[in-house]
Image (cartoon, rainbow, N blue to C red):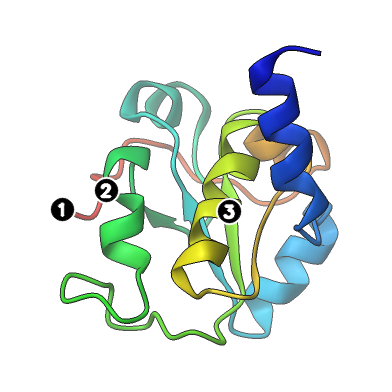
Amino acid sequence: MTGVDDLLTSARAQLDRVEPERARRLQAEGGLIVDIRPHANRLAEGEIPGSVIVERIHLEWRLDPAGEWRLPEVRAELPVIVVCNEGYASSLAAADLQRLGLSRATDLVGGYRAWRAAGLPVRPGGSPAVP
């Protein structure tokens, strides 16, 4: 394995990763789906309805439960499901969020593309990211 493979394995070992249907249920129960994909991917492929768009570069600042720049709904006990294209970058990002104090942070197995392949609702993409 390479260094990044080890990093990914370590990140995933601490996550309770969720399949698309479970992610949808968590969202319906008040969980937050956070889409970290670049604008070009969202524009081309669509978005998960009700998700919050926070590009990866701003993620820790917007989801730090004790941070000055956090999103208003973010609190330490909030279930957060991070979504990327295929479920790799989101695993690393979710592990970072756990280190910040979001103990229920996780990611979507297979990413946005798995959500879409499962036939779950999507909306046209292109929403601006949360600044």
Write down the residue under mark 2.
58
> Which of pointers 2 and 1 lies earlier in the amino acid sequence?
2
Confirm or deny contact between disc 2 and disc 3 (CB under 8 A).
no
Look at 49% across and 35% down and name the residue there.
46
Give the mark, 3 or 1, whose residue is nearer the N terminus.
Answer: 3
Give the quarter of the image for residue 74: bottom left
Q: Which residue is mark 1?
A: 131
Q: Amino acid at mark 2?
A: His
Cα separation between marks 3 and 1: 19 Å
Q: Residues within 10 Å of mark 2 (few under 14, many from 20)?
A: some
Q: Residue at x 73, y 22 (%)?
A: 5
Dot 1 amino acid type = Pro
Discs 2, 1 touching: Cβ within 8 Å: yes
Type of amino acid at the residue the image marks with label 3: Ala
Inter-mark Cα distance, 2 to 3 = 13 Å
From this view, report whether residue 35 is shown above or below residue 116. below
Comparing marks 2 and 1, which lies closer to the viewer? Answer: 2
The answer to whether residue 11 is above or below residue 67 is above
Residue at 48 percent across and 59 percent down: it is 51
Q: Residue at 74%, 50% (x, y): give it.
A: 120
Q: Earlier in the sequence, mark 2 or mark 3?
A: 2
